[in-house]
Image (tube, rainbow, N blue to C red):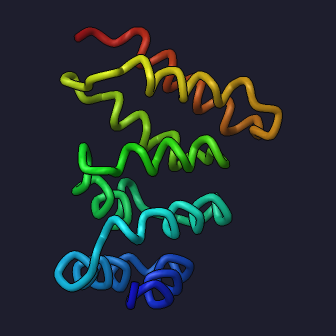
């Protein structure tokens, strides 16, 4: 993972342009899925950073939707949910063709059972659950 330190610095600096450029090099020259665990760990430890909406990191990871991204996202949420990863999970739940939807909803609902969840994250999670339970197909 030859771009790990550069990527970490760009993300921590909230430099979207540099982050995008490094992620592009990773896609072209490295093994992108190998970076997911480190990216999620960085996010878990820095929940208040501006990652964008959705931002280069999410765009990068979503390129691997149905190719390993979801598994890494769920692992991150199980370790330490943050608003941005719950929002990413909500984006997956918006897929009208999502298989095993109940697994993803269950993980979102599990966030509410945790004692280490702050009120803001709890409220946002409740909002997403309400949205997902009340949307029309």
Residue at 36% over, 54% down? 54
Most distant residue in the right direction: 115
Q: Position of residue 88 (x, y in %)?
A: 42, 44
129 displayed left or right of 52: right
Locate residue 113 relative to residue 109 in the image: left or right.
right
| 27 and 121: which is toward the camera | 27
Residue 13 location (% of width, % of height): 53, 82
> Could you say which is closer to the camera, residue 76 or residue 56?
76
Front in this rendered view, residue 99 or 63: 99
In which quarter of the view is residue 116 placed? Answer: top right
In the picture, which quadrant includes the C terminus?
top left
- Which quarter of the rendered picture does the N terminus lie within? bottom left
Q: Position of residue 52 (x, y in %)?
A: 42, 61
* As drawn, 45 above or below 3: above
Query: Which residue is pictured at 26% across the width and 81% down the height?
Result: 30
Q: Residue sitting at 63 percent across and 25 percent down?
A: 110
- Work out whether 10 lies above or below 54: below
Tell me which residue sits at (51%, 47%) in the image.
Answer: 85
Q: Is residue 84 above or below residue 29?
A: above
Q: Position of residue 27 (x, y in %)?
A: 22, 75
Label total for image: 0
Query: Viewed as shown, does residue 13 lie left or right of 44?
Result: left
> Is 95 above or below relative to 48?
above
């Amino acid at each position: 993972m030859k771009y790990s330190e550069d990527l970490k610095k760009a993300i921590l600096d909230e430099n979207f342009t540099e982050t995008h450029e490094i992620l592009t090099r990773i896609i072209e020259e490295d093994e992108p899925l190998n970076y997911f665990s480190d990216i999620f760990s960085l996010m878990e430890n820095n929940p208040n950073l501006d990652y964008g909406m959705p931002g280069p990191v999410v765009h990068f990871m979503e390129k691997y939707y149905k190719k390993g991204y979801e598994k890494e996202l769920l692992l991150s949420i199980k370790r330490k949910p943050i608003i941005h990863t719950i929002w990413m999970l909500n984006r997956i739940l918006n897929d009208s063709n999502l298989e095993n939807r109940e697994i993803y909803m269950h993980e979102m609902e599990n966030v509410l059972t945790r004692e280490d969840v702050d009120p803001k994250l709890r409220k946002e999670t409740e909002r997403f659950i309400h949205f997902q339970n009340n949307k029309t197909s």
